[in-house]
Image: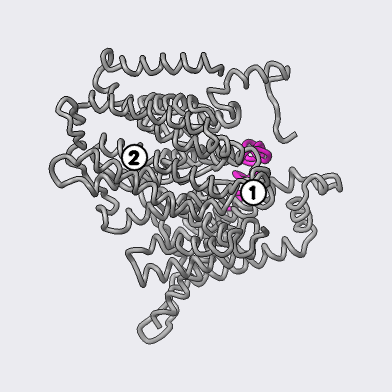
Amino acid sequence: MEWLIQVLNSVQYGLLLFLVASGLTLIFGIMGVINLAHGSFYMIGAYLAFSLTQWTGNLWVALPLGIILAAVLGLLLEWLLIGRLYRRDHLHQVLLTFGLILVFEELRSITVGDDVHSVVIPAILGGSLPLTENLSYPVYRLFISAVCLALAAAMYLTIQKTRLGMMIRAGASNPEMAQSLGVNIRWIHALVFAAGVALAAFAGMIAAPVSSVFPGMGNQVLIVCFVVVVIGGIGSLKGALVASLLIGFADTFGKVLVPELAGVAVYLLMAIVLLFRPAGLFGRV
Amino acid sequence: MRTRTLVLSLLVGAVALALFPALAERFYVQLLTKIMILSIFALSLDLLVGYTGLVSLGHAAYFGVAAYTLALAAPASGPANFWLSLPLSLAASAITALVIGAFVVRASGVYFIMVTLAFAQMVYYFFHDTRVAGGSDGMYIDTRPSIGIAAVDLADDLHFYYLVLALLAGVFFLLALILRSPFGRALQGIKANEQRMRALGFATRRYKLAAFVLAGTLAGLAGYLAAAKEGYVNPELMAWHQSGVVLMMLILGGMGTLFGAVIGTFSYVLLQEWFSTLTKHWPLLMGCFIIVTVLLFPQGLAGLPQTLVARWRSGVGEKDDDA
């Protein structure tokens, strides 16, 4: 039954990655912006969970507060900086968002410090689910997987089945045409960016109790998310989901089977995919 | 810049650098050595980003591989042989660049950025997680490599300074020659329009791979010198932060000019030194500086006159891109 625990861990890690990577892939697919600062939003989320839980004493209050703060941050950033990057060279996007990472990391260091913190799991989810006589699985990890799945479904339904989703898709395939048909593209872009920021921050918030909160956690996630986007195909949500899960398994089982090379396993997977499908599994060539 | 002005500025720069140690304190000689090593690194990336149009965000990997090769090849006590260890380091970087390059030249645009970053990270984790070369602690290099000529002792900072200066000048002229050759012209053609180059019968992928390997090898030269100078290596040498910093140096100086790469490196390092005397939270200042530079001076320092003239001609100072 040991392997079942690893499977559950893989799924949980993969789904969490999907929350961050989906924003990254949508922001690229719709606005054409490569956003290196996306990992910082995950980091900011985790630190928000830590600070707000300390302040309010309750993760359940911290979560909605944190989401609102993250969304506002997203809107503000889009309006001030990211919106100026839409027609710029990728190189400029890389550098500006690289500058943002430095700013966020340093602000974090000034306000919260460089220590590692932990966030307490809420009491209701604190228990463990018995699997066999001597093996059990923490309820909180199952909760993470369930929430991520629900959000993935909500995202799919919003984009495929609602009027807003139709406008987003129209804006992605031909912004000028959508604009001239009366879709407010500026507003759609701001909304998508803010949603991406909120999703990444939310992922950081719910991950905080299991992964702890530490400097540099954002960059670690960012690079794995790049691998997700490369494997899944840029702009594809379905690809991001499949790739996230693949990476969840590769990373978790890599750590169990070949601990020395665990860090490399994810990248080997990427190399193999690139060799056979250069545009990713679900990428349009 | 006109050729005559360019050659004149280069000569003035070279003479100034050559005379510098006579006038400055030891600390500044070491600082300038570091800047010149990073200039070689920036020049190597300029070949890819500025001339071939390939934005690599993983260039630090090749820098680090050469540095580690020196650390692994050097004896536990006493110096390594310069004439053996340098080619070995360069070969290690070239082979790494060849293997990774074979994958990444299949990608283009934003894919290229992500894939180069991811592969560089793979190299980083290889050195970070395995015990091949000291893991996350890195390794020490006992003594600077010996060049085997009695009059030259690289352990002396002054001698090392002149070696680095000579190599910087060498790399500069090598790249200037390459860029004027048919091969260099083809790379610039690929940057302008790859589709058309392919239609003209150029095997563009092969050209890109050659540029990638050449850039990786020259980055390896910089890495070798950095390891020799500092006397130790650790995985942070190839952290993706380094790749971002060297890109910033390029854009600061203005890409697509060799001169700009060197100017950018000088400005970036001096700025960083200055910021770090102001506050221990200097990355905050650096981050703001990067953001402002990208927004206001996308052509870098070398393009500053043109940017200012263009703004002046357009009448209004502020020009919105998302209009």
The number of callouts visible is 2
Q: Which chain does the residue under circle 2 lie in? A: B
Taking the image as shown, residue B299 lies to the left or right of residue B311, namely left
User: Picture quarter containing residue B169?
Assistant: top left
Residue that protrudes farthest toward the bottom in the picture: A133
Is B313 within the magenta? Answer: no
The secondary structure type at the circle numbered 2 is helix
Seen from the viewer's position, the closer of residues B200 and B2 is B200
Q: Which chain does the residue under circle 1 lie in? A: A
Report the mark closest to the observer, 1 or 2: 2
Residue for point 41% across, 40% down = B242
Taking the image as shown, residue A8 lies to the left or right of residue B165, namely right
Classified by dominant secondary structure, the portion drawn in magenta counts as: helix
Residues rendered magenta in the picture? A67-89
The numbered mark at residue A194 is 1
Q: Is residue A3 visible to us here?
A: yes
Q: Are marks 1 and 2 in contact (CB under 8 Å)?
A: no
Seen from the viewer's position, the closer of residues A12 and B297 is B297
The residue under label 2 is which amino acid type?
Answer: Gly
Q: Position of residue A115 (x, y in %)?
A: 35, 48
Q: Which residue is mark 2?
A: B223
